[in-house]
Image (cartoon, helix red, strand yellow):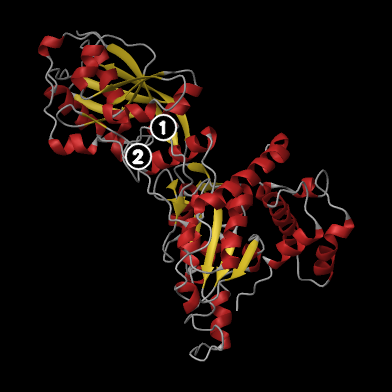
Amino acid sequence: MVAQRFARALSVALIGLEGTVVDVETDIGSQLPSFNVLGLPDLSVRESKDRVRSAARNSGVALSPRQITVNLTPAMLPKKGSHFDLAIAVSVLQADGVMPRTGQVIYLAELALDGALRPVRGVLPAVLAAVREGFPRIVVATANAAEAALVPGVQVQGFDCLADVLEAAGADPKDLVRPVASEQEVASAVPEDLEPEPPDLADVAGQYDGRAAVELAAAGGHHLLMSGPPGSGKTLLAERLPGLLPVLDDDAATEVTAVRSLGARVGPRHELIRRPPFESPHHSASAAALLGGGSGIPRPGAVSRAHRGVLFLDEAPEFDRGVLDALRQPLETGTVRIDRAAASARYPARFQLVLAANPCPCGRATGKAQECRCTPRERRSYFGKLSGPLLDRVDLRIQVPPVSYAELTAGHGGEDSATVAARVASARAAQGYRLGPFGLRCNAEIGAALLTGRLRRPPKVTAALEHEMERGALTARGMQRVLRVAWTVADLDGRDAPTAEDVDTALYFRSAALS
């Protein structure tokens, strides 16, 4: 009778951005040939048995024709993704006596049938989780090595194929076979780190209120609503907001890059994303596309891909009202939690919301509105998509009028993005000095307790706010948001605290009507 053999390797299971180190245990018995994977594997993990068999055979180390049982522990944790392939292969080959034991090493790679290692999604959050749990030794596909190395304190080895992994572990190289990489595979392994340069604010003609509102939004991290006819420049202004924001610090850049790694919208990365992201979903987007979702373990949506950046909803009243109202929770908490039968995932979602709307469904209700044929009921229905609770969370609301012929043909725009970004950086530095001790980054994050405590302003400064609340024009939340904008106005002008004039300016930028 052939004695049973046992071995284990390590990998990481991801649920959202949260990872757990998984023991990949293998037992090889003497029964009839079979290959079973246990421990709540999804379809992609169950299919790994066929990839592992073919990859091992084509690497010169065919598996024994015996009963192979692989168990992924903890068994009650859902396992999803082809990145378990390499760990399963290593565990099986160690149990089969082909590969020497390697110790506490995390394996993250997909196997091709010829034994090549392919890059996978989510390497950065997986490596972060492994290092946090005390496993700094990581083995990945060569294409993922640079991304894995972004985590401080990690020891990364990148390999092109299973044969290389076996040889590095001490296997006899004379019997190993290496696949021949195709030109397409080599090209696809090149990291894609190129970020397009944001367009320049100097390209925007006229729109002095619009430019000032975008600068305020950038300086204080405030949400913004722009209402105006088609072609007035709402999209132009929104697209230039990321170019005014400060570059991301290490913590924020790691969060943003981890979400991008999991979403796999680009290839593997070799540096952190330092530029604030910009997301602009189409108005037909579903709640799952905006917030995240999908079958099995939920994937991040547009709100998480816009984390530490800008989420721009053009033609906002064309979105489904339920989709828009679903934004209220992440706007308040900076996170989104998605519950499914298989698992619950939580993703970061601290973004700046920019809404753009036409004055009416046809977009012509401006000026004398002679060409508009929309009925009052149609207008009410159009703007009814933007609920009061959602609009109450928007700090800045402006009208974007049509641009005149003289402004378009003037031959020069206003200040460029670099000039405005310098003022924004100075304002953010002032906020960091003032709010840093409270764990806050910008004025938009100031809570009610701080506004009525350490940052409380005297009654002569806030008299206009009291008047607006008494006549019902401001809610308590709206009053707090006006105060936050007033602090930003003061920061941009270099003052230590807002004056009554700053409060009036903040009220002006909140008073624009939608129709």
Secondary structure state at the residue bearing disc 2: loop
Q: Nearer the viewer, residue 178 or 322?
A: 178
In the rendered view, tell whether residue 263 sits above or below residue 233: above
Nearest-to-viewer mark from 2 and 1: 2
Placement of 177 over or under 439, stated as above or below: above
Q: Quadrant of the N terminus?
A: top left
Tell me residue 33's x, y (percent). Answer: 17, 23
Q: Which mark is first along the chain, 1 or 2? A: 1
Residue located at (49% from left, 83% from top): 364
Find residue 100 and report its image quarter. Answer: top left
Q: Quadrant of the C terminus?
A: bottom right
Amino acid residing under circle 2: Asp
Q: Give residue 483's quadrant in the image.
A: bottom right
Numbered tag placed on residue 48 in the rendering: none
* Res. 124 mark: 1
In the image, what residue occupies the spot 28% across and 25% down?
Answer: 86
Q: Quadrant of residue 115?
A: top left
Residue 385 in percent (x, y) is at: 55, 71
Image side of residue 87 versus residue 502, left or right: left
What residue is at 56 percent from the left and 89 percent from the top?
368
Vertical order, 16 against 126 (above or below): below
Report whether residue 494 is seen. Answer: yes
Q: Residue at x 13, y 16 (%)?
A: 176
Which residue is the site of mark 2? 193
- At label 1, the amino acid type is Leu
Distance, label 2 to label 1, CA atoms, is 14 Å
Front in this rendered view, residue 245 or 67: 245
